[in-house]
Each structure stands twice: as structure tokens, then as C-alpha cells.
Image (spheres, rainbow, N blue to C red):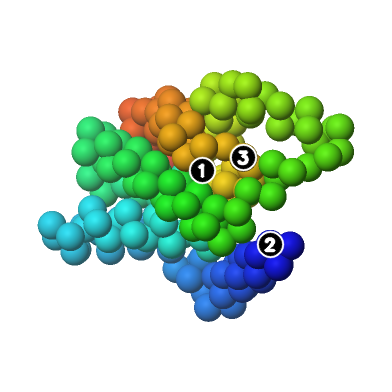
Amino acid sequence: MIRLIVLATVVIALITFGFASGVRERLTIDSLRAMTTSAGSLGALLFIAAFCLGQLLYLPGMVFVVAGVLAYGRVWGGALSFTGALISISFTFVLVRGAGGSPLAGLKRPFLRRALARLDTHPVSTVALLRLVFLTSPLLNYLLALSPLRFRHHLAGSALGIALPTLAVALFTEEVVRYLTAK
């Protein structure tokens, strides 16, 4: 219980810091693109580090995916965005699991047990479906980390679940931006 209180306190502090410091407002698609492209060969590492930090500050992952595609193009940007998303959600999983453990494993309430049952019996497909719908949602990252889910199932399901949305963003972002700026 103490671990969960500490974790909740840290999460609330991070979110509050993100809002109060203005980091959330400054980490935009344009600022991420400018920051990573101006960093030269270290830009990709900087992008992944910013993605990890952004997820901890509850920034939407799609901001990073779009920024990666706009900064590096369809192929390299798509690959970097996919890699960054996978590293970011894995980083959050390991951090939250280390701090909070997996307290959802011990839930006794029938409703909550039923909700977690599919995660127990079909972990990879359940995570893939959740990722397909919620992508890199910080809340989903925390909930999965606090569940009894194994890291390898989390990683495999997350890779499967974010692949299609990341590919779609990589394929269509440039056209959408071109269309919007032509008006």
C-alpha cells in the first residue's frame, strides 16, 4: 500500500510539474521536430528520451509519432516513432512496476477479476487490442504495469498493437499536413 501511495504521489507530482513548468505546452510537434533535427546524429536518441519523458508527463504519444514522421520522413520517421513508442511504454512499464509492484494481481472483487481474466489467459492479444485502441496512453501504461502482466507479454502485445496506427500515421501525416497548409 505504501508503494502505491508513493507511486501516486510521484505521478501527481510529474503531471503537476508538466503543467506548472510549461513543459507540456513547449513540447509540441514543431518544437520536437526542431529539437531533434538540430541535434544532428544525436537527434534520434534525443527524440526517444523526450518520448519517454513526455509519457511520464502524460503527453499524448501521437504528438511524438507525428513529430518523428515530420522530422525524419515516412520510412525513418515511422521506424523511429515505432521504436520510440515501444521504448517509451516499456520504460514506463519497468519504472512503474519497480515502484508500485503488481497490486492488481491480488484484487478480490469479482468485477475487477473478470476484467483482468482476459489479461491472464490471453495476455499478448489483450495488450495488442488495448494498444490498438488506446495506443501509448499513459493511463494504460500505468494500469498494465500494475497488473500481473509479464514484461515479455507487454512488449509483444504493445509491438503488435501500435504497429498499425504508427504505420498509418507514417503513411498519411505528410499528405494531411500538405493538404492543411495548401488552404
Callout 3: 10 Å neighbours few (<14), some, many (20+)? some
Which circle marks residue 4 in the picture?
A: 2
129 vs 39: above or below: above
Circle 2 SS class: helix
In this view, the mark in front (1 or 2): 2
Q: Report how far apart the C-alphas of labels 1 and 2 lie in the structure.
A: 22 Å
Q: Which residue is mark 1?
A: 136
Residue type, mark 3 in image: Pro
Viewer-proximal residue among 18 and 3: 3
Q: Are marks 1 and 3 in contact (CB under 8 Å)?
A: no
Q: Is residue 58 visible?
A: no
89 vs 135: above or below: below
Q: Is residue 28 left or right of residue 22?
A: left
| Residue at the spot 43% in from the left edge and 30% down from the top edge | 156
Q: Quadrant of the C terminus?
A: top left
Spot occupied by residue 41 in the image (x, y as percentages of width and height): 13, 57
19 vs 29: above or below: below
Spot occupied by residue 83 in the image (x, y as percentages of width and height): 32, 41
| Residue at the spot 63% in from the left edge and 29% down from the top edge | 119
36 vs 183: above or below: below
Q: Report how far apart the C-alphas of labels 1 and 3 lie in the structure.
A: 19 Å
| Residue at the spot 23% in from the left edge and 45% down from the top edge | 72
Nearer-N-terminus badge (1/2): 2
Which circle marks residue 148 in the picture?
A: 3
Nearer-N-terminus badge (1/3): 1
Viewer-proximal residue among 87 and 29: 87
In this view, the mark in front (1 or 3): 3
Callout 1: 10 Å neighbours few (<14), some, many (20+)? many
Quarter-of-image position of residue 77: top left
Residue type, mark 1 in image: Thr
